[in-house]
Image: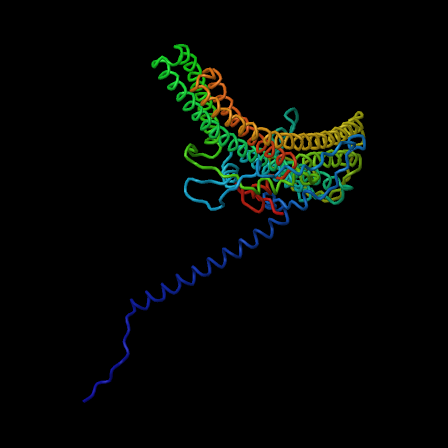
Amino acid sequence: MCKAKYLTFSIKKLNTCIGLSLCLNSMVYAETKQGYFQDIQQSIGSLIRPKTDESFSTVQFSQLSNFQVEPDPIYQQLPVVGASTEVGATAFSTATNHAEVQGRLSLQDAVQIAVKRNPVISQALANLAAQNANIDVAKAQYYPQLQAGLNTGDFTSSDRGRQLYTIEANQLLYDFGKVKSSVDTQKNKLEAEQANVLLNIDEISTETARSIIAVLRYRVLLNIAQDQVKGVSRLHEIARLRSEAGISSYADPVQAQSYVEYAKTYLLTQQNKLRQEEQKLRTLLGFDVSRTEFIIHDEFLKKSDLYRAPQLNAIPSMIAAQAEIEVAKSQKKQTELSRYPTVSLTASLNQALNGKNPNTGKKDDTDSSIGISMSSNFYQGGAVSSQIRSATYAEQAARSKLNAAYLNIMDSSQIARENIENMDKQIWVLIDRERSTAKTRELYEEQYKLGKRSILDLLSSEQSFHSSRAERESARYDIYDTLAMYINVVGKSRDIYQLNNTKIQGFEVQQ
């Protein structure tokens, strides 16, 4: 006889499955509910407070520089230096290899390292973020204002034990543009802070570039000083041997020894200057630079556009001055508008405890009201007029600052051009001098061996040869140093050092 097989199941397992299912459903529901409440919270939040604009750390340079520089006519009559055909010739240009290998660092890369770690820029960015928050403070006047408080009764009367809770709400309806002018003022101040960040970036870039140029200068001068020590030491040895052989007097090696000591002193001086500049550069870059080879590409000269008129509205100092003018103008407008009334919607609710409500006369009663109020600073003893005059003078001062910045830019740029032209011409003279002193040194040495020249003539020619080399190299690096200052003055640092469209401690300049 066959027995029927019935489907069996465990109640315990069923309970486990049901519990697991409920748990999963609860988790999904909780997550959905949480996201729903977050959406509601964000929606309500947008109605009662301004939304912070996080785009302040990204500068749209085309917008920031969207103004026309119009200095007073009396400042515009300045001479223009013409371009020299000799600048950029072989004496000034330096052929470099663009391939980056270990131990080699280009000028652009070094500047980028410096600006991305410098605390001065971090400080400027913190000030920028603080000013961005001030915009939200000004915008908050557009949103509802809530106040709550607790008042007690008059301690000298029978209601001294009464407590009155009060809640008041105020919503701005119309203020003739007072809040808008306040917001505009803070936005103009934000642009001034952005220009200040650009100024700091340019200053650190220039300081780094000039420090690298100084390191390269003293490395070359150190090599020349070492050659000079070797040269005069060789002559001292020749004089000593000739003196011992009786060919020349005993005074010759003594005189040569003084030149050796001078050459060694000069060598120590160059070593000290090099160590100082390397330490300064180490502070800027954050690593030991004594074994790093720095490269200055020819683009450093080509992209500087030495003889092109500077684009004034792209120079951070001009941008900052223009921003201060706009701040003064908006503050003046804000002060003028303070004379006009402000219309608001007001509502209040109060609850009396342990006593009568003063508005209704009933014990522990609640009272509420809603209405429209209008207020105005009708007269403050002439304070508004004084503030307007102050803002007017502030605007005049800001315009004068813009004119001063314009004069400084034009003067510094033209001086830089003239210096570069003169130093480039000087290099060619020094090259000829170096060649003539080299020939003189060879002739004097032959004549000294024949007894036709004194040891002083030979030592002087040796020293003159190395001095001409040092002067030529100094003039070459003077050109580079002047060019670095010129780039800063005309606002081309971010272009030359490839800092545009690059994150610098969270800050970015977009072209």
Q: Measured from the top left, where is residue 417 in percent x and y?
A: 66, 33
Q: Measured from the top left, where is residue 334 in percent x and y?
A: 75, 36
Between 192 and 205, the one nearer to me in the picture: 205
- Check the picture and name the quadrant holding the N terminus: bottom left
> Can you tell which quarter of the image residue 303 is in?
top right
Q: Residue furthest left?
A: 1
From the viewer's perspective, tell me whether residue 306 is left or right of residue 289.
right
Between 159 and 294, the one nearer to me in the picture: 294
Q: Measured from the top left, where is residue 144 in percent x and y?
A: 66, 44
Residue 147 seen in this snapshot:
no
> Can you tell which quarter of the image residue 367 is in?
top right
Look at the image and name its color scheme.
rainbow
* Location of residue 413 with respect to 259 vertically, above or below: below
Q: Measured from the top left, where is residue 89 in percent x and y?
A: 60, 39
Residue 259 seen in this snapshot:
yes
From the viewer's perspective, tell me whether residue 17 is left or right of residue 187.
left
From the viewer's perspective, tell me whether residue 62 is left or right of residue 434.
right
Q: Residue at x 59, y 41 (%)?
A: 494
Total labels: the figure holds: 0
Between 79 and 224, the one nearer to me in the picture: 224
Between 55 and 228, the one nearer to me in the picture: 228
* Location of residue 397 with respect to 165 vertically, above or below: above
